[in-house]
Amino acid sequence: MIGVLVSGTGTNLQALLDARLPVLAVASNRRDAPALARAGAIPTRAFEAADYPERRDRDGAMADWLRSHGVRLVVLAGYMHLLTPPFLERFPNAVVNVHPSLLPEFPGARAVEEQLAAGVRESGATVHLVDEGVDSGPVLAQERLPVLDDDTPETLHARIKEIEHRLLPRVVEELCAR
Ligand code: GRF
């Protein structure tokens, strides 16, 4: 019953697949997203914004495609575009995202760099319900980790991702069981 949206490397998609969760379809806003190659036999499709008159048209088409594959729960696993109402209205309270900070602190695409620049001593990962805002929906689960003195964006993000790869499949499994 799960559809996954990806834009990047797809390690969180891999974690969902490794947990043997029922992923029925994988979509991306980028044809060249490396994550798509992880889907194997699962249907994939790219919905590039440039191919549609407006973002909401793209989002409506993407929602239709996911629904046609039986998707009931959508997981954003490194999906880098905001979703518009034509998408969110098709999946009420059924779109979740994973983010590399302790939301509501440090939303946005540069969360890891911004946490280091701010000198925080603690970071973490958040899984939350998605609304129209930037990483702003209700938090479902969070796990913390210490920031080390010699952390770089790469080392910190790698440790956060280790948490994400445990936390996201766990929350998704719980939502599937609802
Ligand atoms: C993760 O850190 C996730 O929290 C953020 O984007 C990154 C995606 O990584 N939203 P990957 O593509 O799953 O490897």
Image: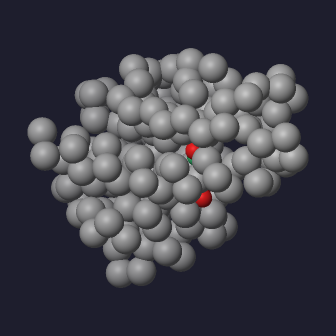
95 and 63: which one is in front?
95
Q: Position of residue 58 (x, y in %)?
A: 49, 42
Q: In the rendered image, is residue 13 in sight?
A: yes
Residue 6 picture location, percent across and down: 53, 55
Residue at figure coordinates x 35%, y 53% from the top left = 169
How many numbered marks does the figure carry?
0
How far across and down, in percent of the image, does residue 97 sit?
A: 46, 39
Residue beneath the point at 60% across and 39% down: 145
Look at 51% across and 50% down and name the residue there: 163
Quarter of the image for the C terminus: give it: top left
89 left or right, relative to 113: left
Q: In the depicted view, which residue is nearer to us: 100 or 85?
A: 100
Residue at 48%, 37% in the rendered image: 143
Can you give x and y, in whole percent of width and height, for residue 136 in the image?
51, 20
Instruction: Say which quarter of the image contains residue 138.
Output: top left
Q: How is the image coloured?
A: one colour
Image height of 27 relative to 73, above or below: below
